Image (cartoon, rainbow, N blue to C red):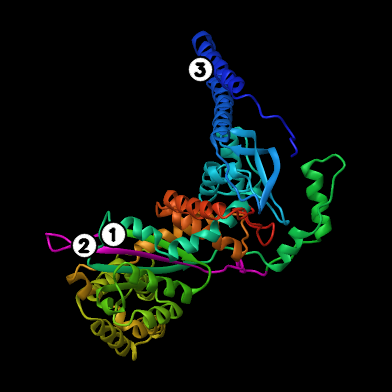
Amino acid sequence: MNDRKECPDVKAVEAQARQRFEALLAYCGKEDGKFHRFEQRLFTQLFELGRLLVLVYLLHRGLRLRVRYNERKYRIGEVYATRTLQTVFGEVSYGRLYLRRRKGGSGYHPLDVALGLTRDGFSPTAISLLARLATRMSYQSVQVICRSAWGWAPSTETLHALVMGLGRYANAYVDQGQWWRKKQSKRKDGAILVIEADGKCPPTATQAELAKRRCSRPRCPCCCQRHRGQQKRQQRGPKRRRKKGDKSKNGKEAMLIVMYTLRRGADGLLHGPVNKKVWGTFAGRRAAAAWARAEATRRGFPPSRNKDLQVLIDGANGLEQNLRRLFSGALFTLDVRHVEERIWKAGRAFHREGSAELASWVKERQKLLYERKPDAFVAWIEGEQQRLAGQRGGKGKRQALQKLLDYVQPRLSMLNYALLKRKDLVLASGQVEGAVRHVVGQRFDCAGMRWIVENAENLLQLRCLEVNGDWDDFFAWIMRQNETKLRRQEKVLIRRKPQTSLGDAA
């Protein structure tokens, strides 16, 4: 046996904690300064007391632990193997028994197994809070918040590794329907299932950008940011200028699915949304459609109940094809706002932009769209084209109407808005439009960000869980999975190295 460090006396640590608490009481009773200064000092001293109390807990758990192990497989490696654990109160050092395998290989620490601690060096609460903040803001912003609240902050590389590690569990949690098992007994779904789908393209890093980020950084003798930046620009060479009108950002589409149900009320109307869930992926439209099919079945709407489904899309052909293949018989609806945009665009060929005549012209066409069948709307377009055929200066108007017809005619089966209004069903995909702005736009499409798809996928999955309100249950599920592995004496490490150092440049 090898004792690296003597175990501290529990009584002495308890006495130190009591002394610290008494000092805090005395400080609160005698302090005569300004409240701002008092609050700052109290905050710091409370965290010091918290670290002492955590150490008291760890020492007592170590003393109460009764270690039983197979002496044929393991032997005592160290009686007091020290470890530094980063908690929300700060660093706490403690020691515990280490059992080594007799025939080689890694051993395990019985106290860590009993406490459910992984090899990440962070407490579970710290891991959960750090990753949860990272789903809401950039890694640099998380550091600012942590320093302000806790007095310490991990590196951006550590934050990135935690997000990548937790992201591995997110897909398994959703695919196994863990969140639905939790909700099923509390709130039943409605009679109509609504699926809304849309996408957004966050900026992704090009190979040239990645090469620049991976190159060695020049060092400035004076270590000032200004000269480092100058040397870095000289090393990279002149920046390639874009062509006029080129606003591309090398975007990769993130598909979002919003799923909820509507419940028929005593007034005969459909109320909701009920049990709304948001899910996103960078894997493409086919993967999004496959997830929607599996989730609908899990919620009690198998393919035999497709008639109770409404699917709202923005008219993208690839998305419609993938969804129709899996939701044959469902009611497909084109977001009415997209049709109205085309009507306004066509109307500008007839009347001046912003004029009352244009608004009146559009309002009449909207009334036709909402109150008549789609064939009547197409017949009006074709009739207008024939009327303008012989008129002088009518070419531009006919072309505008033709563009509207080209958009509407292939999607005619999804334009029966009069029927939808009578049944009190959904006309516009406002739920998924808002989710796209909130889930993707506010976190992935900010200035200075360049993502790698594999890394962004993990963060997107975690952000969806946080937005859905499932984070606490998700992390509790992770803890149960890890505790099972720890009891089998397996190595458990949540952190995972990302594919590159580039992930969140904001």
The amino acid marked with disc number 2 is Arg
Total numbered badges shown on the rendered structure:
3
Residue that badge 2 annotates:
263
Element under disc 1: strand
Q: Upstream in the sequence, badge 2 or badge 3?
A: 3
Q: Which mark is residue 273?
A: 1
Assign a secondary structure to mark 2. Answer: strand
- The tag earlier along the polypeptide, 1 or 2, is 2
What residue would you read off at disc 3? Answer: 35
Q: Percent from the top left, x then y, of residue 111?
A: 58, 41
The one nearer the camera, 13 or 208, is 13
Q: Quadrant of residue 243?
A: bottom right
Quarter holding the N terminus is top right
In this view, 470 is above or below 7: below
Give the CA distance from mark 2 to mark 3. Answer: 53 Å
Residue, x 48% and y 52% (percent of image)? 480
Disc 3 marks a residue whose amino acid type is Phe
Q: Which residue is most to the right? A: 221
**Percent of width and height locating residue 238:** 79, 61
Using a 10 Å C-alpha cutoff, classify the residue at mark 3 as few (fewer than 14 neighbours), some (14 to 19) or many (20 or more): few
Q: Residue 266 lies in magenta, yes or no?
A: yes
Q: Nearer the viewer, residue 191 or 101?
A: 101
